[in-house]
Amino acid sequence: MNPFWSPVVGQLAPYVPGEQPKVEDLIKLNTNENPYPPSPRVAQAIAQVLGSDGQALRLYPDPACTTVREAAARVYGLSADQVFVGNGSDEVLAFVFQGLLNHSQPLVFPDITYSFYPSYCRLYGIRYELLPLTDAYEIDLPSVPAHASAVIFPNPNAPTGKAVRREWIERFLKERPNTVVVVDEAYVDFGADSCVPLVPTYPNLLVTQSLSKSRALAGMRVGLAFGQPSLIEALVRIKDSFNSYPIDRLASAAAVAALEDTDWLARNSQQIIEDRDWLTGALQYYGFQVLPSLANFVFARHRNFDAAKLAAGLRERKILVRHFDKPGISDWLRITVGTRAQCEALADAVEALTKT
Ligand SMILES: Cc1ncc(COP(=O)(O)O)c(C=O)c1O
């Protein structure tokens, strides 16, 4: 360890993102990006901000992200002071962990979940406990220990794709009014119930969302949080102690256009849901167990073939999927729902790899 490092640096366990390959002709089903371009309004909005000479870029953006907050508030039936905007939901989550989840009693999250959560805990020195998923890979909220100060989980969960019904989350919010509940809805638009409508009722609820998946804007980095104003204030206080301008002018314009094009969102999500069903059927046909997914990916394991070897074989055939070499999930592959043609290419490659 370099003696110039602050002590915390040596103790970090940084998140490892999925590969972003340099070559063009790979079928990328490893990081849950949307396979389609965003709403055409996005490119128009960016072009409008740029103008012919990029003049607007001289000026700092609005530190309060007012236009994005107002657009999200309109779309979700909230007020702008119930919305926070960050540089991708990963940044929003980083502020949430620091600002709302660091208490003397532990934070709780599922043992199989988004692997960024333990990285944030290391960064901020947050004590946490793991909630084991059930045998059906589900999150059982009533099993959250009573001493938990807070709980966070993705809904649908990643990488399983399974979701908790809103009624169960509402029951938990009511029964544990002193527990902070953060629902990470990065994948909610592909079929799960959103908890955003519960925000005005429950002061202990914060919901995060991402424009990276269902709005096809992973490259712009915009994430949202919804909560009552005093929770939002905590995030603003952290942001303004860190970086006043996390969202640039182009990303703001893109986010507003994407949020407002609700027809595009509905059509795109429907397409991905149909292709998810097709992909699930194809994988089952070739001998996979596939968890029923409400996300834009499926989690699948083959009855006879090793997951790491299958992932390597797919890569040789220029298809990237995600394999996590971690306890409890090393038999599984997480496969993003691509276009129908990409899903068909995956099915063909699987057929070739599993032929006996
Ligand atoms: C569960 C979950 N939450 C949050 C994110 C972060 O998304 P982004 O930072 O692109 O908004 C991801 C990304 O893969 C995710 O899987």
Image (cartoon, grey):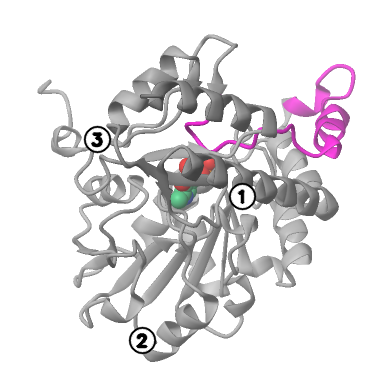
Considering the numbered disc 2 on the image, is that residue within a helix, a strand or a loop? Answer: loop
User: Which one is closest to the eye, mark 3 or mark 1?
Assistant: 1
User: Does residue 211 appear anywhere in the picture?
Assistant: no
**What's the residue type where badge 1 is placed?**
Asp
Name the residue rendered at 27%, 76% in the picture.
144
Q: Which residue is mark 3?
A: 325
Q: Is mark 2 within 8 Å of ligand 1?
A: no
Q: Pinpoint residue 346: horizontal percent, then vertical percent.
A: 54, 27
- Residue 122 placed where, x, y %? 22, 47
Q: Specify whether 10 is left or right of 60.
A: left
Left/right placement of residue 100 relative to residue 197 reads left
Q: Residues within 10 Å of mark 2 (few under 14, many from 20)?
A: some
> Which residue in the protein does label 2 denote?
176
**Residue reaching furthest front?**
356
Closer to us: 75 or 2: 75
Q: CA distance from mark 1 to mark 2?
A: 36 Å
Q: Is residue 318 above or below residue 4?
A: above
Q: CA distance from mark 3 to mark 1?
A: 26 Å
Q: Amino acid at mark 2?
A: Arg
Magenta stretch bounds: 28-57
Kindly tell me whether residue 182 is visible in this rendering: yes
Name the foreground residue: 216 vs 232: 216
Residue assigned mark 1 = 277
CA distance separating discs 2 and 3: 35 Å
For this orientation, the residue located farthest to the bottom is 175
Q: Is residue 52 magenta?
A: yes
In percent of width and height, residue 109 lies at 30, 62
* Image label count: 3
Which of pointers 2 and 3 lies earlier in the amino acid sequence? 2
- 256 or 25: which is nearer to us? 25
